[in-house]
Image (cartoon, rainbow, N blue to C red):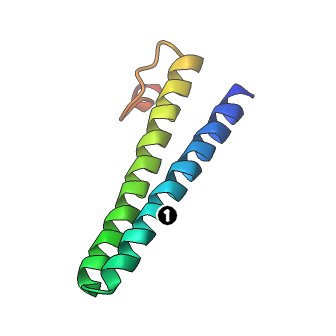
Amino acid sequence: MIAYIVGAMTSMSAGTIGMIIATSANVKVTYLCNFDPEKALKVAYAAGQVLGFFLVSASLCVINIIILAYRPGVLAGLGAYATEV
């Protein structure tokens, strides 16, 4: 139950931050399209990358915290279950 709530909170924060980034990027892209469409495309692409990296990093951090909360002896990270196979 706790993992479900933490996952929902992470999803809500990622959505909120994503909307803030998207709104800010859309304003910049709309302005840049008047002068240089190529630069506008680069700004739009960079904004999408920021959101993607934030979402992945937040998810990995939360998953590691949940793993450590439920199984304190397990080192969370790459190969966390390699010794259990």
| Residue 29 sits in quarter | bottom left
SS class of the residue under badge 1? helix
Residue 74 drawn at (x, y percent): 46, 19
Q: Which residue is drawn at 44% across and 71% down?
A: 26
How packed mark 1 is, by other alpha carbons closer than 10 Å (few <14, some 14-19, many 20 or more), is few
> Left or right of 17: which side holds 38?
left
Q: In this view, does 81 lie above or below 40?
A: above
Q: How many numbered marks appear?
A: 1
Q: Is residue 12 above or below residue 50?
A: above
Judging depth in this view, the residue of 48 and 39 nearest the camera is 39
Residue 33 drawn at (x, y percent): 33, 84
Q: Which residue is drawn at 43% across and 70% down?
A: 27
| Residue 13 sits in quarter | top right
> Left or right of 51: which side holds 45?
left
Of the 4 image quadrants, the one containing the N terminus is top right
Q: Is residue 58 visible?
A: yes
Q: Residue at x 42, y 26 (%)?
A: 76
Q: Name the residue under label 1.
A: 23
Q: Which amino acid does label 1 sit on?
A: Thr
Residue 77 drawn at (x, y percent): 38, 31
> Left or right of 69: which side holds 3?
right
Judging depth in this view, the residue of 15 and 85 nearest the camera is 15
Residue 47 drawn at (x, y percent): 37, 63
Q: Is residue 85 visible?
A: no
Q: Which residue is drawn at 56% across and 18% down?
A: 69
- In the displayed orientation, state which residue is furthest to the top: 73
Q: Is residue 76 above or below residue 22?
A: above
